Amino acid sequence: MASKEKQIKNSLIYLLPVFIGNLIPLATLSIFTRILTKEDYGVLGLAQVYAIFASGLANFGLTVGYERNFFQYVELKKSSDLLYSTLAFVISGFLVVVVLTYLFKSHLAKWIIGSSVHSDILFWALCSTGIMGLKNYYLIYFKNTENAKSFAWYTIDESILGVVMSLFLVVYLRTGIIGLVCGQLFASLTIFLILGFNFLKIYPVRFNWGILKESLKLSYPLTPKIFLGVIGNQFDKYMIGLLTTVGGVGIYSIGQKVAGVVFTFMGAIQNVYSPQVYKRMFNLGQKGGESVGRYMTPFAYISMAVALIISLFSEEVISLLTPKSYHGAIDIVIVLSMFYGSWFFGKQPQLIYAKKTHISSLLSVVIIVLNVLINIPFIMKWGAIGAAWGTFLAGLISGGIAFWVSQHYYEIKWEYKKIGAIYLIFFCSSILMLLLRNAHVGYEIRVIAKCICLASYLYLGVKLGIISMENYFVIKQMLPIQRIIFFQRK
């Protein structure tokens, strides 16, 4: 199979779990939001702040070390050493965090959420997030070996199982918001155990301190980045709860959930291009920058296409899926879509390739300072929507700094005119939607404006050669992709 056809095939397979994994939770949002209150979602959002922070520390940045060193230790024995040594270290760290959290969960819940009543949600949110993190090491293996079918299958299984279990707990047993957490925990733990069993058939358990030490050298400088990064990324939720209400956190969390489709999609696209980017970097060195730049333009266009669609039609999505009490999330979705879209460049592994992970931690200090300085006055003045704007502005500034630093250590020769046109249409369209909504322009006019923005972006894709008959026929040949996944499962 030609390289281009293989890339499109892998892209479609990687996007399938994103489509299913986001479509089902968004569809069930119309059920959950009519049972659970915005205050419930606020409690969950604050519990997840701690869960992401604690599980990130337990991982010690080893997801990055494992992904990079995977291409260094390609031999079967070394690959086994790398996988199990990494898992052993991370599981040990996670168990320590779990025990400490259980012992102090009441104090932590009172400090983070505002009441010790929610201590169980805090604890089980940590367990759920931690197991999802452990499972990701197996998924990284599938991604780096370009085994898109297995990656998609296990991801889809987890999404469906999590939603079904959550519906059972929340709708049938009426467990409340903790049912969402336990449903996801059950799904993640089940898939993690199945993956562990299947991998044991291929790789015997091995531990290699030398390989682990090499990964830790690369990863430990990222621990401050994780610490500061979580504060930076989750600080907005915490400050909304502190300065306004838990209900405000709930509205923000719903907006973040919908806009998060952009971030998830970009992660799926990254699963397609990152192995190729690493290969170009390792094989061509500094000379690979031009090749990487040309290769990345279509991925930038595709990523922004999803961000544009979510931004343009956030009003329809929120209005259809949630009751009126949640409609304050519409503008939040638009602003956060711009934020996630702007971080396309921040997902490139230049500093990791150059083994400058300590620079990433220093950049995290800049991000957290900007978030604090911008978000506090914005939240105090405008509440949840202020948090969205503050996060976006801080992200633009810090993203620009991170881009400049990354280019210094490994220069990717981006196609700036093409990338600039993509972002121009995206940002102008999103801001136009905000202006029309806040000016209370009639819905019919807003729909026409949305269609014009979307048509402009499609026209740009044709001009750039990304939307073409050649690509259409290749994709058409790949459309029976359900057979690839559901009948050729490995």
Image: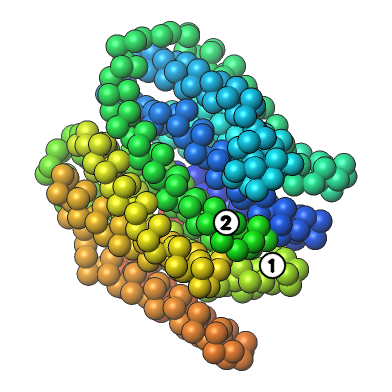
Q: Is residue 294 visible?
A: no
Q: Is residue 246 left or right of residue 350?
A: right
Element at label 2: helix
Across and down, in percent, residue 118 comes to 71, 42
Q: Is residue 89 left or right of residue 422?
A: right
Q: Identify the image quadrant of residue 191.
A: top right
Kindly identify the residue that appears in the image at 30 percent across and 32 percent down.
221
Q: Nearer the viewer, mark 2 or mark 1?
A: 2
Q: Nearer the viewer, residue 408 or 58?
A: 58
Q: Nearer the viewer, residue 198 or 331?
A: 331
Element at label 1: helix
Q: Quadrant of the N terminus?
A: top left
Q: Which residue is mark 2?
A: 242
- Under mark 2, the amino acid is Leu
Q: How many other residues sit within 10 Å of disc 1, few (<14), some (14-19) or many (≥20)? A: many
Q: Is residue 65 visible?
A: yes
Across and down, in percent, residue 123 comes to 65, 33
Across and down, in percent, residue 400 comes to 26, 60
- Under mark 1, the amino acid is Tyr
Q: Give whichever of discs 2 and 1 has the lower sequence position.
A: 2
